[in-house]
Amino acid sequence: MSEETMTISLTVNGEAVTRTVPVRQHLVDFIRTELGFTGSHLGCEHGICGACSVRVDGDVVRGCLTLAVQCDGAEIVTIEGVSESGEIADLQEKFVDRNAMQCGFCTPGMLLTAAELLSQKQEMSREEIREFMSGNYCRCTGYHAIVDAIESINNTRLKG
Amino acid sequence: MKAPKFRYVRAESVAEALKLLDEYSEDGRILAGGQSLMPTLNMRLSQPEILIDINRLDDLKGISLDGDTVRIGALTRHVEVMKSDIVREHLPLIAEAIPHVAHVAVRNRGTFGGSVALADPAAEMPACVLALGGTLVLESVDGKREVAADDYFKGLYETERRDNELLIEVRIPSQKKDRVSVFLELARRHGDFAIAGIAAYGSVSGTTVNDMRLVYFGSEDKPTVGANAIAALNGKTWSDETRDAVTAALESDLDPMANLHGSAAMKMHLQKVLTGRALDAAIERAGGAQ
């Protein structure tokens, strides 16, 4: 079978892009190899680890379980986008303060998932934070420091 | 790994999707949320000739109340089910189960209909639909037909759905106010595939149990009604003696599949434990004595 391609137009981190892509290419390969945004990481490539988390039309999704062609017309935001906008600058700073990362491979996915948690503007116990973050693997920290950082910023913002 | 080559069509109407399904039959796959299909493609466990993407078919989205029936469009995403006031009020069993469906990023994308249609043995929604006596509406180029959940689940990923049929919606009777429901599951990590699970729905008066339906998932090849356990339970007062009789009867209902999560014996044990916990909770929720 020959490689079928399709031309798609979408917005990535605020910029309009049009590309012709293989229909079987998933979103994270597209973002990394076609557009050069390498902050979205590819871990397990079957939806378990969460390292590839990206935002599609406002919702965090698994980038490896979404085809690029399905995102024709969509608005994509990656870790580069939220870093640029400053939306979670406080959380990123807190990750550093609390040592909520070591190798950093899971961090972009953790931050984007945590950004969705923060956007709910709800009080959350540590247990609830762990449940919300349960789709993102970290193999270094043991999660404690990650929960610390998210809990701290969620509480600070709610007081804010 | 990377997905194998396939053709891709974004269906613009239900009619177009049905026509393609009819044409390609078993060589075509419906791409709904993709949260189960995409992993099998990336791992090259399946190699369809064509993916028929139904994500833009707005006719298949949404939750509505139609008399005493809740209608859930097949393309309704788990997150929408989770946030639905209709589901919270009329289908508390599903409201209790939905947080157990995978993780936030998967719920944002995965669909209710996809989960029910695929019938993964560890999935929560097929068990709930079966426990609540739901009906699946399937459509092909030949027309629509309704299949009771009781008749839909046949075996490991085997269902009553024909290769040229698309699940359109699921109709679930509103839970009756004088009944209780309980959903419990055990998984290694919150949101992971269930090792054992139970969906229970029925009536409890004081500590007497009636018309209770027990559906088991996670351990079997398909969501399974615990017919013998139910027979040992209904009409009885919930007591240590009843618990022993029900869990003993359960052994003839279930035939757990051993896998990395545990042996058949361990899963049988866990389903018995969950049965006891579910009935304890049902009695408590109905206001009866502990």
Image: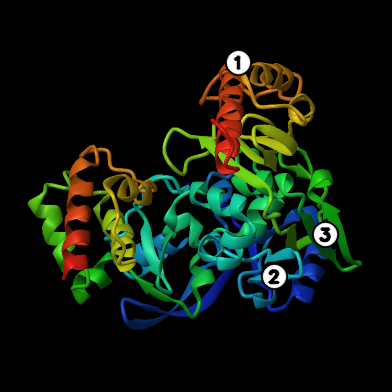
Same chain? Circles 3 and 1: yes
| Snapshot quadrant of residue B267 | top right
Q: Is mark 3 on a helix, strand or loop?
A: loop
Name the residue that disc number 1 marks. Answer: B265
Query: Mark 3 or mark 1, which is nearer to you?
Result: 1
Rounded to the nearest angstrom, the CA distance separating label 3 from label 1 is 39 Å
Residue B164 disc label: 3
Residue B65 disc label: 2
Q: Is mark 2 on a helix, strand or loop?
A: strand
Mark sitting earlier along the chain (3/1) = 3
Vertical comparison of B169 with B46: above or below = below
Q: What residue type is labelled 1?
A: Ala
The percent position of residue B220, horizontal first and vertical second, equals 67, 30
The percent position of residue B96, horizontal first and vertical second, equals 54, 49
Query: Mark 3 or mark 2, which is nearer to you?
Result: 2
Q: Which amino acid does label 2 sit on?
A: Leu
Same chain? Circles 3 and 2: yes
Residue lying furthest bottom: A16
Q: How crowded is mark 2: few (under 14 residues within 10 Å), some or many (20 or more)?
A: some
Vertical comparison of B103 with B216: above or below = below
Q: Residues within 10 Å of mark 3 (few under 14, many from 20)?
A: many
**Of residues B219 and B159, the one drawn nearer to the viewer in this rendering:** B219
Q: Which amino acid does label 3 sit on?
A: Asn
Residue lying furthest right: B142
Chain for numbered disc 3: B
Residue lying furthest left: A97
Query: Looking at the image, which residue is at 81% across and 61% down?
Result: B138
